[in-house]
Image (cartoon, grey):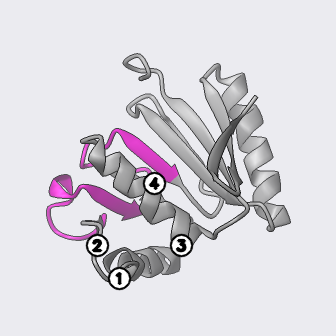
Amino acid sequence: MADAGVCEVWFYHLEQTGLDQALPELLEKTLQKGWKAVVRTVTPARIDHFDGWLWSYRDDSFLPHAPVEEPDPARQPILLTAGEERPNAAEALFLVDGAEPGDLSAYQRCVVLFDGADEAQLQIARGQWKSIQARGLPATYWRQGARGWEKQG
């Protein structure tokens, strides 16, 4: 666990599955830890997509969530946004679609998910990796292998 005020940044390189499969699994693990989450994307259309998807991604489950504009966002375990809001006091920030991290001091963990088959996303993730290291934050790189997530050296 990170010290108070020091956010761990984990980069997840998607190679075996897409974002729609990986994100719900990681959000489930976040909620199991007793944490709240913010999912930050870059466009309102993507918020609409995730809003529908997190209710229906699996027949026997759903992830409680809402777009940040919905009433009483502080009560939501998972908030969807294209901005830097954090009214639910989330411990975890998930960055998708090349969203920028911004100020991470309030988070315990930031998870950057990027598609290994998308050259633009690879370039954004490389730039974010360099920026996170320059800020002195602990960064970890996870690669999606045949047997799940593998932490790389």
The magenta region covers 67-94
Question: Does the CB distance between marks 1 and 2 fall below 8 Å?
Answer: yes
Q: Which mark is residue 20?
A: 3
Disc 3 and disc 4: Cα gap in Å?
A: 11 Å
**Does residue 13 show up magenta in the picture?**
no
In which quadrant will I find the C terminus? Answer: top right
Closer to the chain start, of discs 2 and 4, is: 4
Circles 3 and 1, Cβ within 8 Å, touching? The answer is no
The correct choice, above or below, for 48 with respect to 87 in the image is below
Going by the numbered disc 4, the residue's amino acid type is Leu
Q: How far apart in space, not on screen, are marks 3 and 2 (Cα)?
A: 13 Å
User: As shown in the figure, which amino acid type bears the numbered disc 1?
Assistant: Ser
Q: Which residue is mark 2?
A: 62
From the top left corner, tell me how far across and down residue 14 is, in percent. 68, 59
Q: Which residue is mark 4?
A: 26
Q: CA distance from mark 2 to mark 4?
A: 13 Å
Q: Residues within 10 Å of mark 4 (few under 14, many from 20)?
A: few
Q: Give how far across and how far down residue 91 sits, in percent.
A: 34, 38
Compute the Cα span from label 1 to label 2: 6 Å
